[in-house]
Amino acid sequence: MNETVTIVGAGLAGSLMAIFLARRGYSVTLLEKRPDMRLESLPAGRSINLALANRGLKPLRAVGLEDRVREQLVTMRGRMVHDEQGRTQLQPYGQHPWEVIYSISRPGLNALLLDEAQAAGVELRFCKACSRVDLDDGVLAFADEDDGQTIELPLRRCIAADGAGSVLREALMKRTDFDHSVEWLEHSYKELCIPARGDGGYRIDPNALHIWPRGGYMLIALPNLDGSFTVTLFLPNGGDPGFDSLDTSGRVRGFFHDQFPDAAALIPDLEDAFFDNPTGPLGTVRSAPWHLGDKLCLLGDAAHAVVPFHGQGMNAAFEDCLEMDACLGATGGDWARTFELFFERRKPNADAIADMAIENYTEMRASVVDPRFLLRKQLAFELERRQPDRLVPRYSMVMFRDDIGYADAQSRGRTQLGIMERALEGKERLEEIDIDAVEREVLETLPPI
Ligand SMILES: Cc1cc2nc3c(=O)[nH]c(=O)nc-3n(C[C@H](O)[C@H](O)[C@H](O)COP(=O)(O)OP(=O)(O)OC[C@H]3O[C@@H](n4cnc5c(N)ncnc54)[C@H](O)[C@@H]3O)c2cc1C
């Protein structure tokens, strides 16, 4: 086959999509505005690790990369909750040994995907920033940052994987029949680092996602293979505490020592890193439709960026690649129909994970220490033990089940929540609940998964 496909953006989604298409025999060109990240050192403060879940592993397995990706993973079995006194409590994510998530290095994974794309015959072109999109004349223009020239390519069979700030989405959404919104959270994030010990070991338990929940804000830490942890502070922009009021070294030190004393003791360059590293905004992108004939289709964050509290943005972007590949198979390579089908199948799922990701911020920063939340979790686990084919906690459906779409997880989750909330009314301990009656309600209300 000699059909060409252009992909804009060689991040996680663009690189994986390129591999899928090259495997189908397409001639793929992947253009990226940044230099080749495999040759660069990492800029400070960039999100350098991510939580990978089963639904993100499935597409990697489909292109034969699972074993090589597994070499880069650190397993996280649950949330390690740190209170103000420095006491910790591990809350397992699930109740089966396989119910875990993984921490992976973003640059390590991206580099692996680029290597694999190159080996599959994809043409990689770095320092090419898409600067203009002419939908009517069907032209894509790229500023060549090597020689200052402009390159033009025909706008046909183009996949826009240029991330949350997509210029291709902007172009598409100027048309009257397209719609999009970017909903900014009034909270931002800042990355810091807990270094490895002198002997290369971890300073805190590596097999957990650490959370310091403080109601209106939180600190989290994910392990890296080299013994370090990437730490992220999520905090309101305004107010006190807020990023705006943490404006001197003394205030930053005071805030960390009051709120996260055990973490502060492990971050040696705390104040310098706080002011050197950027503060990143957090937003949800919703758009519709994502495609224009056989010319263009949005993929990954370009179509549906979500806030990071369910750790699902990359996982959703990888699922997109698998679904786009399945749509190509289903349509026999009819690109206009492929893009249409892809949008129909993925849009409800993208909307569902966007909502659930926002809800999960409250869960992480506050509910994990709320006795009612913990009791509901106990009840959900008990019901799952009794009826594993009918009741699976929503968190488990999202994080561990690659056979349940986000939209189904969200709607089943609503029904389950109703059943459990009724059962919990006025109760403080599991023993007070008539679990047989709740189980009967589960059997009557929830069909088998
Ligand atoms: C703080 C934080 C933590 C996160 N944690 C997790 C997590 O734990 N788990 C998870 O699943 N997800 C997480 N995410 C989300 C995840 O990072 C994204 O969903 C994922 O990177 C999306 O991949 P993408 O390829 O669509 O976009 P990106 O990774 O943003 O890639 C877009 C690429 O396009 C390039 N580009 C941009 N504009 C142009 C242009 N004009 N021309 C050419 N190239 C261009 C960029 O340089 C980039 O390489 C997190 C996000 C944040 C902000």
Image (tube, rainbow, N blue to C red):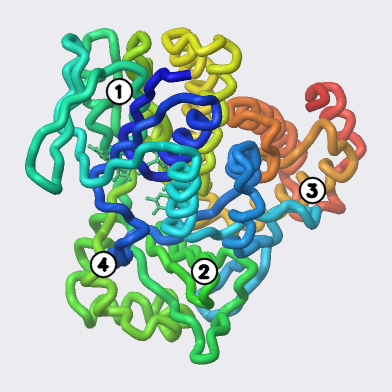
Given the image, on which type of amino acid does mark 1 rest? His
Decide if residue 272 is on the left or right side of residue 364: left
Q: Earlier in the sequence, mark 4 or mark 2?
A: 2
Given the image, on which type of amino acid does mark 2 rest? Asn
Decide if residue 260 is on the left or right side of residue 78: left
Q: Position of residue 434 (x, y in %)?
A: 88, 41
| 44 and 247: which is toward the camera | 44
Which label number is shown at residue 277?
A: 4
Cα distance in 3D space between marks 2 and 1: 36 Å
Q: Position of residue 18 (x, y in %)?
A: 45, 34
Q: Quadrant of residue 97?
A: bottom right
Q: Is residue 410 visible?
A: yes
Q: Which residue is mark 3?
A: 381
Q: Position of residue 184 (x, y in %)?
A: 29, 40
Given the image, on which type of amino acid does mark 3 rest? Phe
Image depth: mark 4 or mark 2 in front: 2
Cα distance in 3D space between marks 3 and 1: 39 Å
Secondary-structure class at tag 3: helix
Q: Which residue is mark 2?
A: 224
Q: Residues within 10 Å of mark 3 (few under 14, many from 20)?
A: some
Q: Is residue 207 above or below residue 123?
A: below
Image depth: mark 2 or mark 1 in front: 2
Cα distance in 3D space between marks 3 and 2: 30 Å
Q: Earlier in the sequence, mark 3 or mark 2?
A: 2
